[in-house]
Image: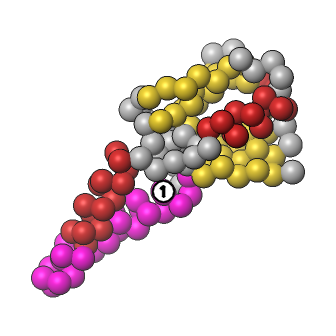
């Protein structure tokens, strides 16, 4: 069974996206074609990021997908603990309302599923040792 959890999108992503998209429209209206190309590419990259950042639980694996930048495959059995955190570090998370997942000996990843409680319940249902 596969469960897919989309990333929550917070103001630190939404504000720049709206600003760039607004600039794109303004550049079209003013016919500033070089600027249309630049803002158009930026808008497409940001929209792609928003629609392609998600977390999949498939069997005993957690798959972390962030656009075309980060792809991680984590054995759910190796997860030690999950801690809610508000952090600006670079991560496959589109919100500051995040979870830090500690796995293996020293590894961790920051994510921001929309439904954090359901996500954590599902992981703990597979690995009852998660704190």
**Few, some or many residues within 10 Å of mark 1 (<14, 14–19, 20+):** many
**Residue 78 higher or lower than 113, as above or below:** above
Q: Is residue 18 left or right of residue 69?
A: left
Q: Nearer the viewer, residue 2 or 92?
A: 2
Q: Is residue 87 magenta?
A: no
Residue 130 position in % (x across, y down): 75, 21
Which residue position holds label 1?
49
What residue range appears in magenta? 25-53
Callout 1: SS: helix
Residue shown at 56%/31% (left/top)?
99
Name which quarter of the figure residue 101 lies in: top right
Taking the spot 49% from the left edge, 26% from the top edge, the residue there is 85
State the residue in front, 89 or 9.
9
Q: Is residue 73 left or right of residue 42?
A: right
**Where 69 sits versus 80, above or below?**
below
Position of 100 relative to 64 (above/below): above
Q: Residue at x 54, y 40 (%)?
A: 112
Question: Can the viewer see residue 3?
Answer: yes
Colouring rule applied to residues? secondary structure
Secondary structure mostly taken by the magenta-highlighted segment of the chain: helix
Q: Is residue 120 left or right of residue 93?
A: right
Q: How many marks do you count on the picture?
A: 1
Q: Quadrant of residue 31?
A: bottom left
The percent coordinates of residue 25 (x first, y second) are 24, 76
Q: Residue 115: x and y, percent?
A: 62, 44
The x and y percentages for residue 58 are 81, 46
| Residue 71 can be seen in this image | no
Q: Quadrant of the C terminus?
A: top right
Residue drawn 17% across the image and 84% down it: 29
Let me know if residue 31 is in the magenta part.
yes
């Amino acid at each position: 069974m596969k469960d897919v959890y989309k990333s929550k999108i917070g103001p630190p992503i939404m504000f720049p996206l709206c600003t760039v998209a607004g600039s794109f429209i303004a550049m079209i209206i003013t016919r500033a074609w070089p600027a249309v190309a630049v803002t158009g590419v930026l808008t497409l990259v940001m929209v792609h990021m928003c629609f392609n950042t998600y977390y999949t639980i498939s069997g005993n694996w957690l798959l972390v997908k962030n656009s075309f930048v980060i792809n991680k495959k984590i054995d759910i059995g190796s997860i030690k603990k999950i801690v809610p955190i508000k952090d600006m570090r670079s991560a496959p998370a589109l919100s500051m309302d995040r979870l830090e997942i500690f796995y293996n000996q020293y590894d961790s990843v920051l994510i921001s599923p929309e439904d954090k409680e359901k996500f954590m319940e599902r992981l703990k249902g597979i690995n009852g040792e998660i704190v």
